[in-house]
Image: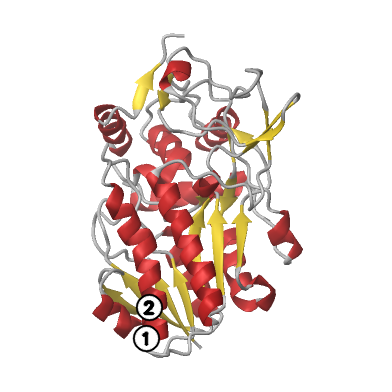
């Protein structure tokens, strides 16, 4: 069986490629090695056993070639940034997905399944409960609130603080350009799949962690920031008060989910959350990283925040559990895997400091007066 993996040089894609090859599948990779994620070109961990096609997933002629003789498609190629180039998100994340279905239908290709990589971002701020008004999916927290250091979500009806809840797949409220483009991708995948009889699945990953997360991708998140900072003996910034909840899942558990939905017909035409099943605060996560690095460095807590960040988010993964999947690796496992990767490549460039300065210039990092 031949499998196409777009974005196969990336973090999730490359680990999926490794597992597919190990399981005996023939694999093609399409990747444009976009900077800054692939700062130094084609990574050395790309296996020689996989056919590598350099190019853009928006290129119809290239994708026609890539889809020849393919049985399964994993569509991981994506665009993420903080820049307001809104159309790029939709061109890469949504239009490229439509193009895959367009080619399959036009060419009458015998593709057996398409699996797309969506994101927890589609859930927006996530599900909350007000004691008086019940379940609510709030809007983003605005500058007026955050500038005062008021971090928690208030009920829009009575103003009281609300309690976050695990968010299931049907509670959707995408609120930025990336999230909206991913929701559009899901809709294309599931609806065109149903219409044309192409089994399709969308996986909404939470914060995936482990080796091969790019040192240069600002979207690699807390693992990258904390690990690189402590490796270079520098104190990282913890935004807000550090009590915000995050949902971390190990890359190998994600690959397990990828192969499970590939193999299970019961997954067809469905969307699944893929998360760690455990709420972890940023403060708790920093303490875990600090213990692994034996750094003993106090982080910077100065009231800074990133405008547009969610306060608390935890995916409800019960639907994927019913399919037979379970997260098996701990947060500490992910930290250790990333530490080994970092020590192998030994980055010495101040990527964290440069990312912070860039986000300040874009007015993403701001400071409260509360």
Q: Which mark is residue 102?
A: 2
Q: Is residue 350 above or below residue 261?
A: above
Q: Is residue 294 above or below residue 97?
A: above
Indicate the position of residue 33 as horizontal and vertical percent values. 27, 62
Residue 258 or residue 332, whichever sits in front: 258
- Alpha carbon separation for disc pair 2 and 1: 6 Å
For mark 1, give the secondary structure: helix
Q: Which residue lies at the image location 50% right of the left edge and 46% below the top edge?
A: 121
Residue 327 or residue 100, whichever sits in front: 100
Q: Which residue is mark 1?
A: 106
For mark 2, give the secondary structure: helix
Indicate the position of residue 107 as horizontal and vertical percent values. 37, 89
Whether residue 156 is visible to the viewer of this picture, yes or no, is yes
Q: Is residue 59 left or right of residue 336?
A: left
State which quadrant residue 300 falls in: top left
Residue 182 or residue 56, whichever sits in front: 182
Indicate the position of residue 275 as horizontal and vertical percent values. 61, 51
How many residues crowd mark 2 within 10 Å: few (<14), some (14–19), many (20+)? some
Q: Are marks 2 and 1 in contact (CB under 8 Å)?
A: yes
Q: Is residue 309 above or below residue 159?
A: below
Q: Which residue lies at the image location 65% right of the left edge and 44% below the top edge?
A: 167
Whether residue 115 is visible to the viewer of this picture, yes or no, is no
Residue 289 or residue 117, whichever sits in front: 117
Q: Is residue 203 left or right of residue 51?
A: right
């Amino acid at each position: 069986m031949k499998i196409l993996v777009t974005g196969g040089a990336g973090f999730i894609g490359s680990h999926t490629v490794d597992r597919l090859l190990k399981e005996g599948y023939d694999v093609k990779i399409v990747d444009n090695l976009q900077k800054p994620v692939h700062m130094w070109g084609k990574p050395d961990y790309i296996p020689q056993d996989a056919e590598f096609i350099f190019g853009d997933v928006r290129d119809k002629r290239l994708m026609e070639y890539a889809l020849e003789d393919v049985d399964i498609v994993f569509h991981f190629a994506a665009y993420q940034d903080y820049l307001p180039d809104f159309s790029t998100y939709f061109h890469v994340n949504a239009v490229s997905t439509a193009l895959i279905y367009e080619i399959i239908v036009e060419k009458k290709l015998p593709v057996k399944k398409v699996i797309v990589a969506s994101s927890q971002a589609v859930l927006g701020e996530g599900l909350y409960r007000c004691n008086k008004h019940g379940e609510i999916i709030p809007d983003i927290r605005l500058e007026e609130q955050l500038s005062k250091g008021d971090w928690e979500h208030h009920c829009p009806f009575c103003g009281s603080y609300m309690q976050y809840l695990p968010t299931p797949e049907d509670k959707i409220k995408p609120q930025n350009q990336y999230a909206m483009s991913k929701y559009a991708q899901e809709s294309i995948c599931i609806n065109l799949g149903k219409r044309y009889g192409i089994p399709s699945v969308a996986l909404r990953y939470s914060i995936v962690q482990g080796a091969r997360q790019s040192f240069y991708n600002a979207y690699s998140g807390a693992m990258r920031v904390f690990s690189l900072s402590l490796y270079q003996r520098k104190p990282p910034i913890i935004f807000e008060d550090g009590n915000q909840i995050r949902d971390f899942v190990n890359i190998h558990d994600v690959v397990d989910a990828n192969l499970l939905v590939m193999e299970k017909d019961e997954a067809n035409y469905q969307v699944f959350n893929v998360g760690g099943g455990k709420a972890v605060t940023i403060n708790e996560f920093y303490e875990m990283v600090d213990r692994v690095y034996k750094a003993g460095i106090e982080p910077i807590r100065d009231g800074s925040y990133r405008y547009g960040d969610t306060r608390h988010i935890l995916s409800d993964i019960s639907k994927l559990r019913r399919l037979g999947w379970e997260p098996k690796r701990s947060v500490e496992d992910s930290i250790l895997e990333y530490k080994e990767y970092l020590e192998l490549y030994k980055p010495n460039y101040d990527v964290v400091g440069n990312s912070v300065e860039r986000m300040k210039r874009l007015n993403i990092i701001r400071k409260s007066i509360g």
